[in-house]
Image (spheres, rainbow, N blue to C red):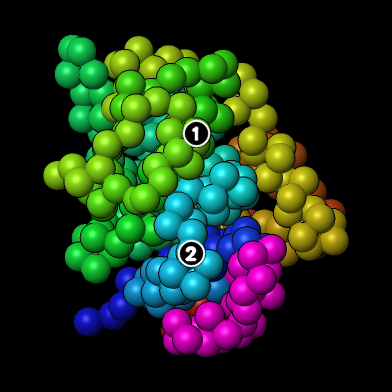
Amino acid sequence: MAQPLIHSHLLDGLYDIIIERGGNAEALAIEAGLSASIFDHEECLIPYEMHNRLLELASKHLSLPELGLEIARRQTVSVFGPLFALIANQPTIQDSLEMFSKHLQIRAQNTKIVIESSADKSCISPVSDIEVINNSHTFEDHALGLAWQIIQILHGSPCKLRAVYFKHGEPENSSAYTQFFKCPVAFNHQSSELVMDPSVLKSHTCPDAQQLPQQLRRHLEKKHNDRLINQVKDVIISLLVTGNCTINEVAPAMGYSTRTLQRHLKLEGATFQALVDAVRHQQAQIY
């Protein structure tokens, strides 16, 4: 059975945390079974269990039980790439989170966001099908932290949580948790949950969040030195797994209209379908 994979971008920020606290990032990566070059910002998919082992090792070596929260604090929506740009134009926060969960496989396989709502409360729970991951302290903290960051970005104006529940035990000092979520927190719970008023999820996605495709485009321009063909390929690689990788999906994810992207590609001597075919061929060679 193939090992579930997670995108290396979900480690963004970890290297700096380790170095700031006097640790040896490369040595920890090797101990976790990964290459020492995993922090060199080359995009790749890595086995989920090795990713989790690295976080657990770093948390222990740094004596930092809230490592998952600290990573979430430092990460931006760029760790989710085109996935976040896709959800930014959904009408409500709940619609955005449902689409996010549907396509989360782009970045983290065998992982989803479960949303449960009643008349008086809504609960958000990050869940993995992999038992060792689902029971991981650092996965739980990182996933809940990122989920809360995403909700705040989509909401725009200040919103509050009623409570946050963790399955793992209570650390000696839980102040980092209350400071991060700014609400009551509880441990040794039967599930991991962000609990909020239902009105939060019913809120319209804020206009600022709808500018995320333009932010992604600027990120891609910088990453690929303004080479449009490589920028488009980058998005295609991420969206192919959704089964809905068309120019009508890729263009708005990059902040273009379909016609504008077609025109720019034509000036580069390329077509969208040719780029899709090239990416498929490249992936077939790799896998």
Q: Residue at x 52, y 87 (%)?
A: 30
The residue located at (58%, 85%) in the rendering is: 27
Give residue 236's quadrant in the image.
Answer: bottom right
Q: Quadrant of residue 275?
A: bottom right
Residues in magenta? Answer: 18-43
Say if residue 90 shows up in the picture.
no
Residue 250 drawn above or below residue 241: above
The answer to whether residue 215 is left or right of residue 127 is right
Dot 2 or dot 1, earlier in sequence: 2
For the residue labelled by badge 1, is the local secondary structure a helix, a strand or a loop?
helix
Q: Quick check: 283 above or below 260?
A: below
Nearest the eye: 104 or 51 = 51
Residue 12 lies, in percent from the top left, at 60, 60
- Residue type marked 1: Gln
Q: Which residue position is annotated with label 2?
A: 63
Crowd tier of the residue under label 1, counting other residues whose Cα lies within 10 Å: few below 14, some 14–19, many 20 or above: few
Q: In the image, which is nearer the foreground, mark 2 or mark 1?
A: 2
- Residue 23, magenta (yes or no): yes
Contact (CB < 8 A) between labels 2 and 1?
A: no
Distance from label 2 to label 1 (Cα)?
18 Å
Q: Residues within 10 Å of mark 2 (few under 14, many from 20)?
A: few
Q: Nearer the viewer, residue 102 or 36?
A: 36
The location of residue 33, given as percent across then percent down, is 45, 86
| Circle 1 residue | 179
Give the amino acid at mark 2.
Ser
Quadrant for the C terminus in the image = bottom left
